[in-house]
Image (spheres, rainbow, N blue to C red):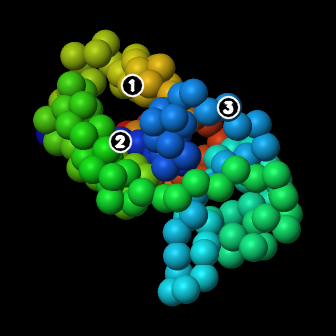
Amino acid sequence: MTTRRFLSVWLPLWRTDLWRRRHPDICISSGLVLQAHDGRKPVVLATDATAQGRGIRAGMTLAHAQSLAPDLQVAPATPDRDDEALLRFADWCFGFSPIVAPDRLDGLWIDTTGCDHLQGGEAPMLEALRGQIAERGYAVRLALADTPGAAQAVARFGRDAVSIVPPG
C-alpha cells in the first residue's frame, strides 16, 4: 500500500509579492504594507519582509504601523483579486499533481501521492517546484509529510525553505 504524501506550499508574502509583480516599476525600500479596513479603522492586511523587519505585523492599525515606520509605503489591499490569483496559481500547480487546492489565503495543498517519480523523487520534485515559484517572484516554503497537518506545521514553522518529513 502506498503511503499518502501531502505537500504544503506556503507563500508567506503572497499579497505583497503579488502587489510587487503588478507594480514592477515602483521601487520600495522602506517597507510595504497593504491596507484594509476593520470597521472604520484602517489596518495592515499584509506586510513585506522589510516592514516585518521593522516590527510591523498584519492586523495592527495603520496608525501604529506608521508610528513605527513613518516612511512606510502604504497601498490598498485587493483581497478578491489576490484570492483569484491564488486559484490561478493552484491551476498552474497541476503540472506537479492532479490534486491541488487552496489552503487559507496564502498557500496550497498538493497531494503528491504517486507523483514524485515523475520528477525524479521527492527532493527533486520539491526543489523544482521551489525554483519555479521563486523564479516567478514569490517567497515560498514547502513541506512534504504523511499528513496535511504535519506538512502545514513544518512549512509554516520549520526552519528550512524545503522540508521533507520521512514517511512514517
**Residue 64 image point, x, y percent:** 78, 73
Residue at coordinates 51% horizontally, 35% vertically from top-left?
A: 23
Report how far apart the C-alphas of labels 3 and 1 lie in the structure. 27 Å
* Of labels 3 and 1, the one closer to you: 3
In terms of secondary structure, where does tag 1 sit?
A: helix
Residue 119 visible in the snapshot: yes
- Residue closest to the far front: 25
Residue 168 visible in the snapshot: no
**Residue 163 image point, x, y percent:** 52, 36
Label located before the other in sequence (3 or 2)? 2
Q: Is residue 42 left or right of residue 71?
A: left
Q: Is residue 161 left or right of residue 50?
A: left
Crowd class of label 2 (few under 14; some 14 to 19; many from 20; radius 10 Å): many
In terms of secondary structure, where does tag 2 sit?
A: strand
In terms of secondary structure, where does tag 3 sit?
A: loop
Label located before the other in sequence (1 or 2)? 2
**Along the line of sight, which residue is nearer the eye, 168 or 28?**
28
Report how far apart the C-alphas of labels 1 and 2 lie in the structure. 11 Å
Going by the numbered disc 1, the residue's amino acid type is Leu
Per the rendering, the mark at residue 118 is: none
Per the rendering, the mark at residue 129 is: 1
Going by the numbered disc 2, the residue's amino acid type is Leu
Quarter placement of the C terminus: top left
Q: Quadrant of residue 127?
A: top left
Tag 3 residue: 27
**Residue 143 image point, x, y percent:** 46, 41
Label located before the other in sequence (3 or 1)? 3
Assess whether mark 2 and mark 1 are in contact (beta carbons under 8 angstroms): yes
Residue at coordinates 57% horizontally, 27% vertically from top-left?
A: 25
Per the rendering, the mark at residue 7 is: 2
Q: Quadrant of residue 56?
A: bottom right
